[in-house]
């Protein structure tokens, strides 16, 4: 539920408009990077009083990922008494970013029986561990066997496996590591001129830490590719919100990141999209942003520079955000008559919450809205 409007009491905040906010932040956080995020786009309203997000989406429906935690289990695909008395230890993150560990023993009656590991799993902890140490069996997997960690039904269902340890090994093959934050990339149509193009996607985890992933368009650019962490080279498992998606050349067709709801292994389609670079662009254009965690930064709404091209009609601008100190989302709305308006806000967002802008009209006449959105982010 999102409230419309708010009533806040702000004591001695030290700024009253966008310019004074920038000066205040640069003074208050001297020596710390203050980043100005500017989003500019011309967009036609939807001929509806129901608002749509201010973004370039390539004709796709762009979704936000849920931060739902998973209940995970462990089992072997073969009943083998050699595992009796032995177990497996794993390191993972919860959706709150809490680094956690589990240790469980294999079922001694039948090692094919799934044993519960954790109920708050978001992804493997590849920030503090390597693929060789993030999940370790105290006994090597027996010849002809595989040990799986995943969600219920994983022994029979490959798509439910989040890690696989193959015969003679004690830790998983890196390509078998998955999480609730898996993300993949592809191009809309096979485009020879885009083969080998590297797509860089900076993103936030559910707990508000920013990282960078990337993928390279394959020889057949419509082939789905997993994003890998730009620093470690490991698969991205902790994706939650896009920040920026870009490349070094204009793309021939849209390039998107997302997820296949039906498959994890051998993904053949992306049916939930998290972001897109539209055809003939080299970067994503979207108003949505995510506030960093309190430990890594602060995010402030600055101002909106809006022009409505139709002097006889109204464009409605809606801003969705969670003010600092609040737990629930707020929406502020302006009706902009034909012409130009500058809308200052200078409001700080609650850490690890969403910000976005939507537009609508009177439901009968679409109007062209040209808007520039300004945000200020302090990076610690």
Image (spheres, grey):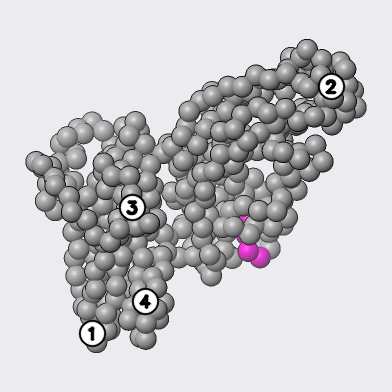
Instruction: Locate residue 305, reporting x and y percent.
Output: 24, 65
Instruction: Please report the residue visible at 20 percent of the width from the left and 51 percent of the height from the top.
Output: 346
State the image quarter where residue 343 is shown: bottom left
Q: Nearer the viewer, mark 4 or mark 1?
A: 4
Which disc number belongs to residue 109? 2
Instruction: Decide which of tag 3 and tag 2 comes sooner along the chain.
Output: 2
Q: Is residue 115 above or below residue 259?
A: above
Instruction: Locate residue 14, reporting x and y percent.
Output: 10, 42
Q: Is residue 270 above or below residue 108?
A: below
What is the spatial separation of the Cα atoms under label 1 and label 2, in whole angstroms? 77 Å
Which residue corresponds to mark 4? 49
Instruction: Please report the residue visible at 88 percent of the width from the left and 25 percent of the height from the top.
Output: 79
* Label 3 packing within 10 angstroms: few (<14), some (14-19), many (20+): some
Which residue corresponds to mark 3? 329
Query: What main secondary structure does the magenta stretch of the protein show?
Result: strand
Question: Front-most of 21 and 32?
Answer: 21
Asked whether 188 falls inside the magenta stretch, the response is: yes
């Amino acid at each position: 539920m999102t409230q419309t409007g708010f009533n806040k009491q702000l004591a001695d905040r030290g700024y009253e408009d966008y310019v004074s906010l920038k000066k205040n932040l640069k003074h208050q956080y001297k020596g710390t990077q203050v980043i100005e995020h500017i989003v500019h786009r011309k967009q036609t309203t939807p001929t509806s009083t129901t608002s749509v997000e201010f973004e370039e989406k390539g004709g796709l429906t762009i979704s936000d990922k849920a931060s739902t935690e998973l209940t995970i289990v462990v089992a072997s695909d073969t009943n083998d008494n050699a595992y009796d008395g032995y177990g497996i230890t794993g390191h993972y993150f919860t959706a709150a970013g809490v680094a956690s560990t589990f240790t469980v023993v294999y079922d001694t009656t039948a090692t094919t029986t799934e044993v519960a590991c954790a109920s708050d799993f978001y992804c493997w902890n590849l920030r503090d561990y390597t693929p060789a140490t993030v999940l370790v069996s105290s006994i090597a997997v027996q010849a002809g066997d595989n040990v799986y960690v995943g969600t219920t039904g994983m022994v029979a269902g490959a798509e439910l496996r989040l890690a696989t340890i193959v015969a003679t090994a004690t830790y998983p093959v890196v390509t078998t590591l998955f999480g609730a934050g898996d993300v993949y990339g592809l191009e809309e149509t096979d485009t020879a001129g885009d083969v080998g193009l590297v797509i860089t996607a900076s993103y936030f985890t559910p707990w508000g830490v920013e990282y960078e992933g990337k993928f390279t368009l394959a020889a057949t650019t419509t082939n789905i590719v997993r994003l890998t962490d730009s620093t470690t080279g490991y698969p991205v498992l902790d994706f939650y919100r896009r920040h920026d998606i870009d490349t070094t050349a204009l793309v021939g067709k849209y390039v998107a990141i997302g997820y296949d709801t039906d498959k994890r292994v051998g993904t053949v389609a992306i049916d939930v999209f998290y972001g897109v670079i539209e055809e003939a662009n080299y970067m994503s254009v979207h108003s949505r942003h995510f506030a960093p965690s309190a430990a890594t930064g602060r995010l402030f709404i600055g101002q909106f520079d809006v022009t409505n091209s139709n002097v006889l009609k109204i464009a409605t601008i809606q801003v969705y955000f969670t003010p600092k100190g609040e737990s629930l989302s707020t929406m502020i709305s302006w009706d902009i008559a034909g012409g130009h308006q500058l809308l200052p806000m200078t409001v700080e967002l609650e850490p690890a919450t969403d910000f976005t802008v939507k537009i609508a009209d009177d439901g009968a006449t679409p109007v062209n809205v040209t808007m520039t959105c300004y945000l200020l982010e302090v990076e610690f």
